[in-house]
Image (cartoon, grey):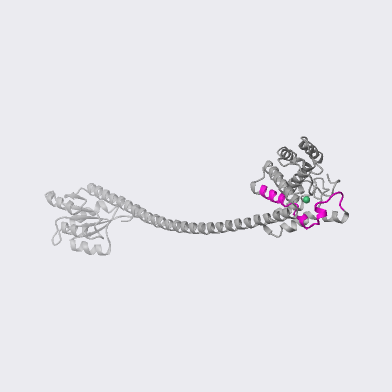
C-alpha cells in the first residue's frame, strides 16, 4: 500500500455471489480501486500479479472457503500483512471467531449497510497505513543505528590506532630526550672537567693568580645570585670569573706579577689577556658563553675599557659583574684596618657610571659587606699599575 495520500488504495472483493459484489462496489468505488473474484482460486490468481491493500472475503464459498483462503494468505509472507475483513451472514458467529483466530481484522454482516462497509474499510486501511509508516520509520531508525554502530566501531578502532601511535611516538621522544639529557650531562661533565683543569693550571702558574680567581669567582657568584639570575647563568658567571685571567698564563712573570709601571710592550701584552683567555676557553664549543664573559671583563661602563671599548648595557652583564668583583678583590687586598670595607665601598662609589654599571651598585656593596677573605699583600690583575683605579 502506498503512503501517498493521493493514491487510491486497492480493495479486493472475494464473493461467489455476483450480486453481493455489486452491492459492495457501489459505496467503495468512489475512493478505492476495486477488483473482485468470485472464487478463492481466482482471488489467488489475481494476487500473483498485484497485491491489494485490503480484502473483503466471503466466509462461505465452494471449493476454497473464506477461512481456508485467509489461512493461506496469513501463511504467505507476501500477503500476511494485508488486512482481511470477512463477509458473513448473521448465523455465522462461530465462523467469525475462527476468522479472527487465523488473522482477520474485522467482519461485516449481510445484508450490508453501505456506510458501515465504507467506514470499516476506511478505518482498516488507515490503520494499515499507520502501521506501515511506523514500520518504515523503524526500518530507517534501525539502519541509522547500524550506521552509528559501524561509525562507533570505526572511531574506536581509529582511537585505538591513534593511541598506539601516540604511545610509540612518546616512547621515541622519551628515548631521544634521555639520550640528549645523557649527552648534555656528559658534555657538561667534560666542560666542568676542562674548567677545573684550567683552574689547576692557573693555580700552578702562580698561587696568587689562583687565590685571586677563587675570590673573584665567589664575589661574582654572590652578586649574580643577589641580582636574581637563574642558577645556570650564575654558574656560567662563576666559571667565567674563576678563569677571567686565564689569558695571563701565556704572559711572562713580569707581566703577571708586575711591580710599578709596565713597559709599552708589556702593556700591549697585558691588554691582550682577555682575548687570549677567550681563545683558550673557546677550545670547547660548549664554553663559548664563558669565553665571551672573559673577553669583556675589562670593558668599562663609559666605554674606556678594552679590548672592544663597549659601553653600558652592550657589555655582557656577566662581564660587568666580573669587572666589579675583580676590582673589589684588588681594592680590598690593598686595604688594611677596620675601615677597609668602607674604603673599598668609597672607591666603588667613585667608579659607578664611569667604570661600573650603577645598577649593580647595591649588589656590589652587599658583596663588599659580606666579604670574608682577608686582604692580600699583593694585588693581582688591576691592569697597568697606578692609572687604572
Ligand atoms: Fe683581567
Helix, strand or loop: magenta stretch? helix
- What is the x, y in percent for residue 221? 69, 45
- Identify the residue at horizontal 24%, vertical 48% (top origin): 120
Q: Residue 95, position in %: x, y?
A: 13, 52
Nearer to the camera, 237 or 162 = 237
Quadrant the N terminus occupies: bottom left
Q: Position of residue 45 (x, y in %)?
A: 22, 64
Count of numbered circles on the image: 0
Residue 259, magenta (yes or no) = yes
Magenta range? 233-262
Asked whether residue 24 appears in the rendered view, the answer is yes
Left-right relation of 46 to 341: left
Residue 169 appears left or right of 47: right
Determine if the magenta segment contains residue 25: no
Q: Is residue 250 left or right of residue 180?
A: right
Res 277 quadrant in image: bottom right
- Seen from the viewer's position, the closer of residues 87 and 292 is 292
Which quadrant does the C terminus fall into?
A: top right
Residue 15 is situated, as x and y percent measured from the top left of the image, at 18, 57
Q: Is residue 173 left or right of residue 243?
A: left
> Residue drawn 64% across and 46% down?
231
Front-most of residues 353 and 158: 353
* Residue 307 in sight from this viewpoint: no
Amino acid at each position: 500500500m502506498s503512503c501517498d495520500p493521493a493514491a487510491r488504495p486497492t480493495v479486493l472483493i472475494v464473493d461467489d455471489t455476483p450480486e453481493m459484489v455489486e452491492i459492495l462496489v457501489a459505496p467503495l468505488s468512489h475512493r478505492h480501486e476495486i477488483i473482485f473474484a468470485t472464487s478463492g482460486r481466482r482471488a489467488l490468481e489475481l494476487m500473483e500479479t498485484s497485491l491489494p491493500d485490503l480484502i473483503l472475503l466471503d466466509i462461505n464459498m465452494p471449493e476454497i472457503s473464506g477461512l481456508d483462503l485467509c489461512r493461506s494468505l496469513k501463511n504467505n509472507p507476501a500477503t500476511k500483512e494485508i488486512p482481511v475483513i470477512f463477509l458473513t451472514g448473521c448465523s455465522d458467529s462461530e465462523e467469525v471467531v475462527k476468522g479472527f483466530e487465523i488473522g482477520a481484522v474485522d467482519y461485516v454482516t449481510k445484508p450490508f449497510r453501505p456506510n458501515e462497509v465504507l467506514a470499516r474499510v476506511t478505518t482498516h486501511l488507515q490503520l494499515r497505513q499507520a502501521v506501515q509508516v511506523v514500520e518504515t520509520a523503524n526500518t530507517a531508525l534501525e539502519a541509522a543505528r547500524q550506521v552509528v554502530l559501524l561509525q562507533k566501531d570505526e572511531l574506536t578502532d581509529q582511537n585505538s590506532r591513534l593511541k598506539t601511535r601516540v604511545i610509540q611516538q612518546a616512547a621515541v621522544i622519551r628515548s631521544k630526550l634521555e639520550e640528549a639529557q645523557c649527552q648534555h650531562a656528559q658534555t657538561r661533565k667534560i666542560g666542568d672537567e676542562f674548567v677545573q683543569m684550567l683552574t689547576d693550571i692557573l693555580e700552578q702558574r702562580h698561587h696568587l693568580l689562583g687565590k685571586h680567581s677563587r675570590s673573584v669567582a665567589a664575589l661574582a657568584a654572590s652578586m649574580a645570585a643577589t641580582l636574581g639570575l637563574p642558577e645556570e647563568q650564575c654558574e656560567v658567571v662563576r666559571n667565567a670569573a674563576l678563569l677571567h685571567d686565564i689569558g695571563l698564563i701565556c704572559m711572562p712573570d713580569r707581566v703577571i706579577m708586575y711591580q710599578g709601571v709596565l713597559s709599552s710592550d708589556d702593556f700591549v701584552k697585558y691588554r691582550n689577556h682577555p682575548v687570549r683567555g677567550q681563545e683558550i676557553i673557546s677550545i670547547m664549543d660548549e664554553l663559548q658563553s664563558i669565553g665571551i664573559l672573559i673577553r669583556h671583563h675589562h670593558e668599562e661602563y663609559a666605554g674606556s675599557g678594552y679590548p672592544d671599548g663597549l659601553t653600558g648595557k652592550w657589555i655582557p652583564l656577566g662581564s660587568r659583574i666580573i669587572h666589579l668583583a675583580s676590582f673589589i678583590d684588588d681594592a680590598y687586598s690593598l686595604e688594611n684596618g677596620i675601615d677597609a670595607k668602607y674604603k673599598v665601598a668609597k672607591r666603588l662609589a667613585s667608579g659607578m657610571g664611569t667604570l661600573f654599571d650603577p645598577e649593580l651598585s647595591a649588589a656590589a656593596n652587599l658583596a663588599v659587606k659580606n666579604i670574608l677573605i682577608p686582604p692580600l699583600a699583593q694585588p693581582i690583575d688591576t691592569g697597568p699599575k697606578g692609572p687604572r683605579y
